[in-house]
Amino acid sequence: MTTTLNHPAAAAGKSRTPIIERLNIVTAFALGAISAFVVWRLALQFLPADTEVRLFTREDKITLLSMIAWFVGFMTGIGALIAPFRWVMGKDLSHDENMFLAGKDMGIKRYFRYTTDHKVVGIQYLIITMVIFGIGGILAMLIRANLGTPEGGLIHPQAYNSIVGTHGIIMIVGTIIMVTGPIGNFIMPIMIGARDMAFPRLNALSFWLIVAAAIPLIWAQFIGGISTGWSAYNPLAGQAPLGMNGYIMFICIFALSTMVAGANITTTVVRMRAKGMTWNRTPIFIYGVVASVALALPAFPVFFLSQVMSGMDRALDTSFYNTAGGGSGWLYENLFWIMGHPEVYVILIPAVAALMEMAPVFTRRPLFSFNVAVMGIAGISGLSILVWAHHMYISGWAPLLNAPFMLTTELISIPTGMLFLVLVGTLWRGRLWMTMPTLSIFALLWNFMIGGITGIYLSDVPADAFLHGSMYVTAHFHYTLMGAGLTGALASLVYWFPKMTGRMFDKKLSWISFWMVQVGFNVTFGGMFIVGLQGQPRRVEAYAALFNRGNLITSIGAAVIMSGMLVLLYGVISSWRHGVVAPMNPWHAKTLEWTVANPIPLENFAVLPVVTSDPYGYGKEKK
Amino acid sequence: MTDLMPPTKNKWWKHPDVKKTFIFWLIFTPAIGIFGTQFHVLSMPDPASEVMGGVIGLMRLFTWAASPVAALVFAICATAITSPRHYGDNPPADADHQISNSPRANALWIVISAVMCLFALVVGLIVLQKDGDALHEAGAINVNVTGQQWAWNYDYANGARSEVLYLPVDVPVIFHITSKDVKHSFWVVEMGIKMDANPGYTTEAAVTPNKIGVFNVRCAELCGLLHAYMQNKVHVVSKADYEKWLADRSALEARS
Amino acid sequence: MKRILAALATVVLGFGVIAGIGTYVAAAKNDSGLTSATAAGTFTAPDGKTYPHYTLNMNVYPNSTFGGHHGAGGGAHPDWVSYGLAGEHGEPLTEAATGTNFVVPAHSAVTITIWQYDSGETITNDFFAKVRGTVGNTATLVQRYDTKTHTNATEAKTVTQIPSDGVGHTFTIHGLADAKNQVFVSVPLPMSNDDEVTAAEEEGGFTQFPTMMTFTIITGDEGEYVWNCEFPCGDGTVARFGSAMSTMSYMSGHWIVKG
């Protein structure tokens, strides 16, 4: 960090520039809104009218340009461009400016700024994850209210299709960031014995990109919604109303956020582990987080590209995905699923790895077979890039490729089985300490087993000919992403809550919420398996009376989940405000984050730790 | 807690935890197998073709094959849960052992997963091959299926066109499926076949209905506003009834 | 205890918020009104069976400025083709609050008359150029109906199909309710004279000589179905099935068989 040269304020002894001080979330929203409005008016005025052949492309262009203007305005307004601008001018931020950006002595205001302290970013991610799940959950309840009505039909088909699509995409984003965001940012650097992440400013960037991305998605709801389901298949997406542009922008910006976070996390873990923390002594949670972002790094650029082409088909009348113009909808499917499959492991691996990290703590014995755990994570990550076309068995694209993809998909069950082995091996002959995270391990094993086995049915091409596109698929992926993924995330929240907030999460509320969510969850998606097997397709807003009972069961279960999540929400708020003050290491765990007392100093460690063993040294030696 | 460890490491199977797990496993395996298969079979519609009968059979087979594995995982969980548990704000004493690895257990687990994987693959490939052969069946009738937002229509070889499918029982039929606009998916539910309808391409699916009755076609790929209503019936009738319907229908179509 | 109560309050509050949002969303239909068919005595089918008889009249306009359920100015999309309720002789019903959701009784005969004020082209899928699902699979076509004198300017003809290159729109009822038999009715609606339609539109009105199709269907068991036009005209969208084609209450609506 070089001090600014030739800066008049520096000469006067003050090296803080007012501009940095002034920028925050309010200026970001303001600048974003103004830019969007200005570009909108300019585009409306100056863009040529559509020719008869290319109708509606003008409206798509106007919408996209306004959204891009929003994005640029927002990022400028939050201060993302300050450091790059300085570099262009041949300077850098001064030490004081960096300390300001890190939120030193800023109090609560630092949460509303472009703050680089990983602990602040972690809390920001926690809040936005909760908001995303809140909105996604409300949308889920609307869906279930509609489907719980006999034969459906409560909500208008247009509104319903958009609710389904929006629910899908924001839950996908929510589950991607739910562990890697709050825990990966707040806890991970401390867990590896570092003072911050490798690229603190990129860290702030990755968070604020998500906030910037959210607005086009909300905007989309008012201009026709997202009528295609979260997978936004073309050519249907090409036909959809203007809201699709919101989806396209949301994905492009979110992809940037993921890539930035991926580069940051990977570099941090590879280069900044404490002295003595060899790969053998690195906690398994770290492996999980790195594998997850390492998977996202190749996958999300492909998603980004697929959406750019979708936008071009709409706004510039290209034909990437239109057969009539020489393109193909199958191109979209391939690009989408090349991202879509690794993406589910991006969601799953951190959650499972977090529970693997907690298992030794709550059984007071070593993690069973660390090497197998690493192999399992690596195996899943590697294989997940080779299985995508199992989402396309029935698309007609390449029937001859169905068999090879069936092979790779079935093979993934081997490394997945390794993760099961590690978990049950850690339960074996341990001394159970019953907390909500402990229960979550059992819940994960139950839910993931069901999710995994139903996945095997789906991976079988002849069975998939019946099951594809039915509610069975929806139930399967909720069992894996929510039953396993969310369970791990909620356990992570309760487990690391003392370190992130300095208070214990209310024990009673965590147990009540756990049981409500888990029981409600199994009722919900058990009912959904039933209607899928009976023959109900996905994404329908009305259905034959045959499916009434299963849908009613599902909707009742959903109400129980929602209640459990509301109890959890209350628990978060009340524990944060007046929960029991936590000791430094309430779980008597052995990873590095528990060696730092709350409130955690800005630079985490006064003296960087030296690691001499792995963090799983529980259990008495056998005589 | 004094540990009930057998005197030598080689008699690991005599450990009470092992015995407990084994008993749980013996109970869970048939329970999961029976519950799992019944859950699936009772929910799925009665099969109207051999293909669907095969799908149901596959579910049974895979469920039974998976149940010992699931049962083992759940048995270990049950053993852990039924051992003395500690509640409270402080942890219990460390567990009595530092078992941090077992190459034998690892190897066994991985080998068994690989074998099950291979089994699932082989079974799948066999059925896949049979379904593939059906696409070239001699004596099959051909029906062109056109998906359009939001209705299916069917064209028969003799010029008959219909919004309902009429098929003769026990005669193979090959569907040639396409779409006029966006992607749809042609799902003949009780016959267990499904194939996407893509604009600009024709895809194929084949089946032999083996039961007389009325069944359902549902669109299985979100295709816009009225996707939920893109459905029609399939009437499987005797060969004679089918011929009569076909003749009547093509006469109707030929009227001007 | 206080915590449990507070948690319970959070749950209640949360559900209150959801219920509020849900009510708002459920109420936001484009055309929430329902039109019932008008009773009209009894009907004897060619096979001798008699049914209670009902009638429905509809218009198809080249835009939405006729008022009706889109409101005085034509609503959010005045330039979109729209179906709406018609008077006894094909007059626009400018005050009608409903217009695309219909309720007809079960096991009855419903005679539907549709005046088609728009022009047309060659239909994309000529399956829909045929009359299907009506009594006798026929309809009565009047190529030019004089809306001023309320008479047929050309002779009424019984048709089983119309030329593929002269289709304006279709009226297609489909969808699976729980009834044993499927409902499927599709009647092509011929185009009116292109020049007359354009000339009338320039003056903010509609042609004096729309086409008129009359047909009768026998309804089956109770159930909820949909109807939509199967001749896409959403220019500029994929397969021309976007915009107006994909928005309820323009060229699609609900068809409810009840009572």
Image (cartoon, rainbow, N blue to C red):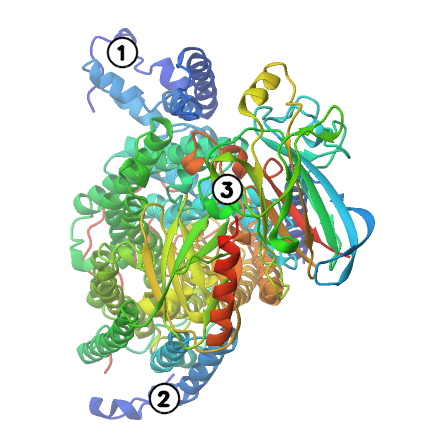
Residue drawn at 32 percent across, 66 percent down = A459
Left-right relation of B44 to C221: left
Cα separation, mark 1 vs mark 3, equals 41 Å
Residue drawn at 42 percent across, 23 percent down = A70
Residue placed most toward the observer, A229 or A102: A229
* Circle 2: residue type: Phe
Q: CB atoms at circles 2 and 1 under 8 Å apart?
A: no
Q: Quick one: quadrant of the N terminus of chain B?
A: bottom left
Mark 1 lies on a secondary structure that is helix
Q: Chain of mark 3?
A: A
Q: Is residue A497 visible?
A: yes
Instruction: Return the residue at label 2.
Output: B22
Residue drawn at 19 percent across, 80 percent down = B104
Where B172 sits versus A400, above or below?
Answer: below
Which numbered dot is residue A225? none
Q: Chain of mark 2?
A: B
Cα separation, mark 2 vs mark 1, equals 75 Å
Discs 2, 3: same chain: no
Percent across and percent down for residue A79 are 36, 22
First in sequence: mark 1 vs mark 3: 1
Instruction: Return the residue at label 1.
Output: A10
Where A283 sits versus A5, above or below?
Answer: below
Percent across and percent down for residue A510 are 53, 59
* Circle 1: residue type: Ala
Discs 1, 3: same chain: yes
Where A129 sits versus A564, above or below?
Answer: above
* Circle 3: residue type: Val
Q: CB atoms at circles 1 and 3 under 8 Å apart?
A: no
Instruction: Return the residue at label 3.
Output: A131
Mark 3 lies on a secondary structure that is helix
Residue placed most toward the observer, A462 or A405: A462
